[in-house]
Image (cartoon, helix red, strand yellow):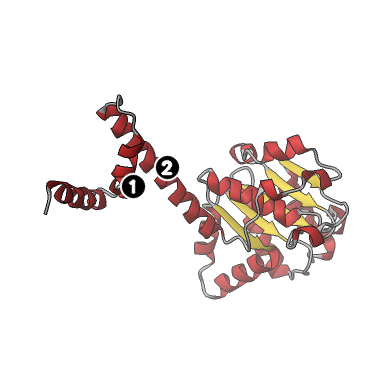
């Protein structure tokens, strides 16, 4: 066995032990170095490669953990179709600055105008920035909360939800929630107030939310918490689901 082969094997071994998997690809870095570059340049290039590899791994892990129903990006949005939203404003939301400010986003509009698409796209942006995101439909979240309580796992689930920098609750309009479901959903939103951000999408204007929940007093408190430090987006307009498949 040649010295080169021995060294290659040792590099692979140490890379595994030190958890530096990208260092195994050191020959790729060598090929891209100029003849006048130093060992420092080589080491810096290797470290940059490892940092990029770890960032991409984190992004993949967080995207998977978010449990998006499908992947949609900001680039795929035809922003000219939004009748009441400015493209510059949407791009600003895409910076995820609203998360650092602990602001919420409430999207209100008729079906097929891109609410789910925009919610997922913003959630994906947050994942790319290294943040923890959780995506639920309102029905799935309420069912999971009820089931967790039945099996005495509610506190554990609530703690998991609190760890999310961004909680997305989609389709807050298609079902009527009983008092028990309403209280559980309210507590999740209330616990996040001024701490972590929530994105909610709905087909119903606020005055119609009483059709979803039994307790009108709780509805008022829920809306108050969601709209405090919040962006309320008017997404009514012409449906373009036929053009974008799963956009809502």
The crowding category of the residue bearing disc 2, from other C-alpha atoms within 10 Å (few below 14, some 14 to 19, many at least 20), is: few
Label 2 vs 1, first from the N-terminus? 1
In front here: 134 or 71?
71
Residue 128 in picture, x, y percent from top left: 54, 46
Image quarter of residue 102 = top right
Q: Is residue 21 visible?
A: yes
Query: Circle 1 sits on which residue?
Result: 22
Residue 99 in picture, x, y percent from top left: 61, 41
Alpha carbon of mark 2 to alpha carbon of mark 1: how far? 9 Å
Q: Are marks 2 and 1 in contact (CB under 8 Å)?
A: yes
Q: Residue at x 78, y 69 (%)?
A: 176
Query: Circle 2 sits on which residue?
Result: 52
Image quarter of residue 37 = top left
For label 2, the SS is: helix
Q: How many marks?
A: 2
- Above or below, 93 relative to 153: above
Residue 28 in picture, x, y percent from top left: 34, 43
The crowding category of the residue bearing disc 1, from other C-alpha atoms within 10 Å (few below 14, some 14 to 19, many at least 20), is: some
For label 1, the SS is: helix
In front here: 110 or 177?
110
């Amino acid at each position: 066995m040649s010295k080169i082969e021995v060294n290659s094997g040792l590099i692979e071994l140490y890379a595994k032990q030190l958890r530096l998997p990208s260092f195994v690809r050191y020959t790729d870095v060598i090929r891209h170095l100029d003849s006048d570059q130093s060992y420092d340049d080589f080491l810096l290039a290797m470290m940059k490669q490892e940092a990029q590899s770890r960032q991409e791994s984190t992004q993949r892990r967080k995207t998977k953990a978010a449990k998006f129903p499908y992947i949609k990006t900001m680039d795929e949005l035809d922003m000219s179709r939004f009748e009441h939203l400015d493209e510059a404003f949407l791009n600003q939301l895409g910076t995820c600055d609203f998360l650092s400010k602990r602001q919420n986003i409430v999207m209100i509009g008729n079906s097929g105008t891109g609410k789910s698409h925009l919610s997922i796209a913003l959630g994906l942006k947050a994942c790319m920035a290294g943040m923890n995101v959780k995506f639920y439909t309102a029905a799935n979240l309420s069912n999971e909360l009820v089931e967790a309580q039945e099996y005495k796992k509610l506190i554990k689930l609530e703690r998991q939800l609190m760890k999310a920098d961004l909680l997305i609750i989609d389709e807050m309009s298609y079902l009527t929630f009983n008092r028990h479901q309403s209280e559980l959903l309210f507590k999740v939103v209330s616990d996040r107030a001024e701490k972590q951000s929530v994105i909610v999408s709905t087909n119903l204007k606020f005055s119609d939310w009483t059709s979803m929940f039994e307790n009108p007093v709780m509805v008022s408190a829920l809306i108050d918490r969601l709209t405090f430090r919040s962006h309320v987006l008017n997404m009514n307009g012409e449906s373009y689901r036929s053009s974008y498949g799963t956009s809502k």
